[in-house]
Amino acid sequence: MIRVFISYDSKNDGENAITLKKELENTNSIKVEAILCPPKPDEVIENAEKIARCIDSCHVFISFYTNKGKDNSWVNQELGYAYNHVRQNGLKIICIYTNRKELRGCLDAKYVNTSNAFNLEEHGIKTVSTNIQKYLIEEYKPPIELELAVGNIFEEGAKLECILTITNNSPKNIFHGTLNFVMPHHISIEPKKNPNGRYDYILKRFTSNNKIDELLNYVSNILPKPHIKKFKIEPKEGRIRHRTFILEELYGVCAYHTTWVFEPHKTKEFDLGVYIHVPFFGTTYYGGYIRLKDNGKLKPEIGRFEPRNSDIQTIRIRTQPTPQ
């Protein structure tokens, strides 16, 4: 989640600040929490320590540096405190203004975004809000792309071989992400025996030389709490299985392999979901379907596998009649 601090003069820019907060918190693709200080224009908060803690916890600082707002002592002090964070912690500053000629001092520095897109006099608050949304999406959109390939294996029963490719497009390595498979209950990730004689559900990662790099730790078969109620199962008597893995490090293109065991006479087609959670960037849900064609030889066909944005994900399980 991206935290944004909005600094404003409550008397002159209060309504615009509230509009901006609402628009930012309705941003698609990324989650934004906008902090107003004071929370309402008719409130007064003169607590420097509380304001400082709020700014400390944010990724973006937005200042309403308008014709009248620039004369507010708190607006100027908050801006000065935020500017110090730019050089120390990489805080990003956006300046909403009405007169560009009045942007002097630190506001004229390269660390402050004073794009014409944020000119309130020229565009109005709705357009400025949209422009800030676009900036945040471009700056903080999840850098992850995920692809899935499925093939069939016939060893000791019907199995599906799954190759999952995760691409990290950001310039930095990402640590401690999580990956969660969501599938019908009668399809299971095949467990492997570990050196201690126990069985683990594992995901094998391959290096560029096609050798197994490491095994990722099995965590649980329960989705994180925020997502538990986000699935609708069809038919109603169907059940869902979850398998969660820790992605210890994502760098460049990472390929993973796992094997699924299933009963082909029970399933004709089913939906497959994959949650991937990346710290700071949040959770993305990918959905698609797998259709099993049986023309003398079982052949899996994977449907469109892409990010899904709806709040409730429907997992459909289409069964085929048991042979008489």
Image (cartoon, grey):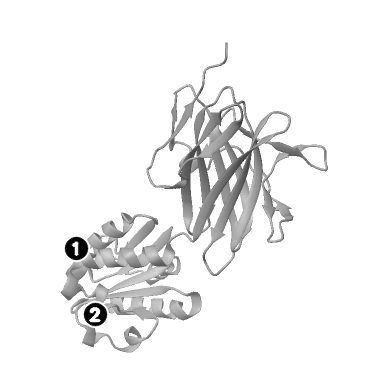
The three-letter amino acid code for the residue at tag 1 is Glu
Residue furthest to the top in view is 324
Q: Which mark is residue 105?
A: none
Q: Which residue is more in the foreground, 196 or 191?
A: 191
Q: Position of residue 93 (x, y in %)?
A: 37, 75
Local secondary structure at mark 2: helix
Q: Position of residue 186 (x, y in %)?
A: 59, 27
Residue 130 picture quarter:
bottom left
Which residue position is annotated with label 2? 70
Q: Which residue is more in the foreground, 125 or 149?
A: 149
Which residue position is annotated with label 1? 15
**Badge 2: few (under 14), some or many (20 or more) residues near its Cα, within 10 Å?**
some
Residue furthest to the front in view is 296
Residue at left offset 39%, top offset 66%: 138
Please state if 283 lies on the left or on the right of 198 as rendered.
left
Local secondary structure at mark 1: helix
| Placement of 206 over or under 48, stated as above or below | above
